[in-house]
Amino acid sequence: MAYALFASQVNLLTYHRLAWETEPVLEGETLLAYHQPGFQLRPGFAYRVKPQDPVANTYQVGLGGNLYPTERFGLGGALYYLFQPGTGGNRFAFSVEGSFRVLEGLWLNLGYGFGETLFQPEGLYLRLDFFGGSR
């Protein structure tokens, strides 16, 4: 199940799925993007729950952001905290990125993630940001 909300200054993206491979796994992510002409903030929460193995349940909170010093270019990054309450394990991951405005309301972001997050491996990534929507 997935849904999205696009408003003039806020975007909300979320998905939740139940996968049944060798064992059931419930996972999902919710991301909020608050944007203004000069900046963007992106708090988020993700989870992977294994009903057969609750010790392996993993959660992630993150905060990303971008600054747009010009109408065409921006710089940004994100910090993620992953934790497993059942094992007491935790770690941080972060990313840095550059942004380029392709069209009004459409930004192309090229970045590099340092450390694996719950749904993104370490390495190079590409993301599109859509701004704007109903008022």
Image (cartoon, rainbow, N blue to C red):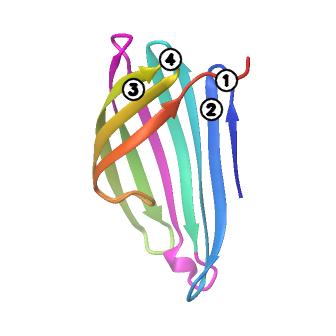
Image height of 56 relative to 5, above or below: below
Q: Residue 99 location, x and y as percent?
A: 34, 27
Question: Which of the marked residues, 2 or 4, is nearer the chain's N terminus?
Answer: 2
* Label pair 4/1, CB-CB below 8 angstroms: no
Q: Residue 96 location, x and y as percent?
A: 28, 37
> Which residue is the site of mark 4?
104
Is residue 125 or residue 44 the one in the foreground? 125
Instruction: State how far apart marks 3 and 2 are (Cα).
Output: 15 Å
> Residue shown at 35%/15% (left/top)?
72
* In this view, the mark in front (2 or 1): 1
Instruction: State how far apart marks 3 and 4 are (Cα).
Output: 16 Å
> Which residue is the site of mark 3?
66
Instruction: State how far apart marks 1 and 3 are (Cα).
Output: 19 Å
> Which residue is the site of mark 2?
11
* Label pair 3/2, CB-CB below 8 angstroms: no
The quadrant holding residue 78 is top left
Which label is found at residue 133? 1
* In this view, the mark in front (3 or 4): 4
Instruction: State how far apart marks 2 and 4 are (Cα).
Output: 16 Å
Q: Which residues are magenta?
A: 50-76
Image height of 80 relative to 33, above or below: below
The quadrant holding residue 48 is bottom right
Instruction: State how far apart marks 2 and 1 are (Cα).
Output: 9 Å
- The residue type indicated by label 4 comes to Glu
Question: Which of the marked residues, 2 or 1, is nearer the chain's N terminus?
Answer: 2
Quick one: label 4, few (<14), some, or many (20+) residues within 10 Å? few
* Label pair 2/1, CB-CB below 8 angstroms: yes
Question: Which of the marked residues, 1 or 3, is nearer the chain's N terminus?
Answer: 3
Helix, strand or loop at disc 1? loop
- The residue type indicated by label 1 comes to Gly
Q: What is the total number of numbered labels drawn onto the structure image?
A: 4
